[in-house]
Amino acid sequence: MITEFSLRNLPDSDQRLDAVFQAFNDLLFVMNADGMILDYKAGNTTHLYVPPEKFLGRRMQDVLPPAVGRRIADVLSKLRAGSKVSFVEYYLPTPAGKCWYEARLVSVNNDQSIMFVRDITRYKRSEEKIKHQLNKLAALRSIDLAITSGLDLGATLAVILDHVREQLQIDAACILLFDPHTEYLEFAAGSGFNTPALQYTRLRIGEEYAGKSVSERKVFYIPNLRTRKTSFLRSPMLAEEDFRAYYAVPLFAKGQPVGVLEIFHRALLESDVDWLNFMNMLAGQAAIAIDSAMLFKNLQSANFELTMAYDKTIEGWSRAINLRDKETEEHSRRVTELTYQLAGRMGFSQPELGHICRGAVLHDIGKVAIPDNILLKPGPLNEEEWVVMRRHPLIAVELLSPIEHLVPALAIPRSHHEKWDGSGYPDHLAGEDIPLAARLFSLVDVYDALTSERPYRSAWSQTDTMKYISDQSGIHFDPAITPVFLSMFG
Ligand code: C2E
Ligand code: SIN
Ligand code: SIN
Ligand code: FE
Ligand code: FE
């Protein structure tokens, strides 16, 4: 038969309380309204800040460290003001280390209160561990973001190194990148160094700990660099950094070496399993960042090749249209060259110049759809023929717009026949509504057309052409660009 355990089986209430306190390791203090300790009960007292008998006859606020004491005093004044129960959480340095307590103060009557104290250190430690874990996750997430947002490799590595230093609590760290072509490990980014000691690092695989970490595919840990005479081969300046602890963590992505993470600390390191796991996680992130940055770089050069392929195709098209128009390749090249020079003088950036040149090469591509009898007519066009001829800019847009790569280049094919005074085509734009690239290109187009033979007339002289262009400033041409264009001819 099982006898139910009950506090009531114990002879008196004091013994009951003793049993409870032995069971729970809690502490109980009886205090007067002012905090003076009148009595106490304690279970296991090994982890106490002060042996509880020393509390007797003293005020709780005075026994505990001042910061904690002030909080207890606050709670006591709340009780005096009429509240029944109040909580306070604090930590104390005890012989067993930092311990956390939760105190519950209960008002018994006007001049007495009881303070129950519970050791919540274990709970607090796991809470701190969770917070630490969350911090780590947040760090990994922000590295992820840096990788996926396409920051350049240098910026991504800087983010990673900041997290390495912060989360691992170490003084300095750097990343060496492995160049598969030269097979050298070279310094790429560093954080926390006082000297440029390591910035010129260039190691072969197998050389020094960093190189060995790659060839042997393992982490090298040197607890104290100062006890090693050969540690500073790489740079005499490294001695000035006064490092003690050192880690070389090889970085591999898809089985291939991409670099080394080096960790330096000016004191000895206490690295537990958690620390090492996180170091490995950060190293993994660094390897992914490097790998994806390399992929991106390769992608960019693939894009570059695609651009080249497009440009070859474009040149082919423009040659076809020029041949039909009885113009020479030399003319086409000259228009593009002149456009490039004029746009360069006007301060366009390199990528914009690329679009402008492609636009220039393709400006009359729409003429492929103009029948020979109009395009090659030896005399002036009639009204019907002009309707057809004036379609060539929009035909160009139709032909080119499906090619995404050429969309930024469309301003010139579409708008090269617009005029400053609004009398041009196809959109009857005027002034600065005409895209700048088209405004500057129209000068080159007319110049080149006038100085070239046409089926309907012979080439104009340079002098006549310059005079005509100058006269058309503010009518056909942007008056701000015309002088820039004319100045190119001295
Ligand atoms: P395009 O020959 O390349 O001429 C481009 C632009 O240069 C012309 O645009 C015009 O602004 C200017 N331009 C060319 N030739 C002359 C000229 O003799 N006098 C003057 N004042 N400006 C000239 P536009 O007028 O919109 O013409 C577009 C295209 O239509 C020309 O390209 C050409 O292929 C064709 N075209 C224009 N006029 C005639 C013509 O009288 N007979 C024929 N067969 N085609 C013509
Ligand atoms: C080593 O790699 O030899 C130790 C650390 C250092 O010199 O950078
Ligand atoms: C050229 O393309 O060579 C100049 C003539 C024109 O712009 O139509
Ligand atoms: Fe045209
Ligand atoms: Fe033209």
Image (cartoon, rainbow, N blue to C red):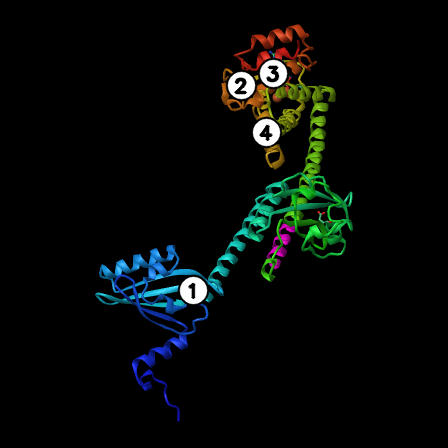
Q: Which residue is mark 4?
A: 410
Tell me if residue 164 comes above or below residue 75 in the rendering: above
- Mark 1–mark 4 Cα distance, whole angstroms, equals 79 Å
Cβ(mark 3) to ligand 1 < 8 Å? Answer: no
Label 1 neighbour load within 10 Å: few <14, some 14-19, many 20+: some
Instruction: Measuring from the top left, give residue 250's x and y in whole percent.
Output: 70, 53
Tell me if I can see residue 403 in this picture. no
Is there a contact, CB below 8 Å, between mark 1 and mark 4? no
Q: Is residue 2 magenta?
A: no
Is there a contact, CB below 8 Å, between mark 2 and mark 1? no
Closer to the N terminus: mark 4 or mark 3?
Answer: 4
Task: Say what secondary structure mark 4 lies in.
Answer: loop
Extreme-bottom residue of the structure: 1
- Residue name at image x 61 percent, y 51 percent: 267
Residue 100, numbered circle: none
Label 3 neighbour load within 10 Å: few <14, some 14-19, many 20+: many
- Mark 1–mark 3 Cα distance, whole angstroms, equals 89 Å
Task: Say what secondary structure mark 2 lies in.
Answer: loop
Instruction: Measuring from the top left, give residue 385's x and y in whole percent.
Output: 59, 20
Q: Which residue is mark 3?
A: 443
Tell me if residue 12 comes above or below residue 275 in the rendering: below
Q: Which residue is mark 2?
A: 424
Q: Nearer the viewer, mark 1 or mark 3?
A: 1
- Image check: 309 left or right of 106? right
Q: Which residue is mark 1?
A: 49
Q: Nearer the viewer, mark 3 or mark 2?
A: 3
Q: Amino acid at mark 3?
A: Leu
State the extent of the magenta-drawn residues as a range.
276-288
Cβ(mark 2) to ligand 1 < 8 Å? Answer: yes
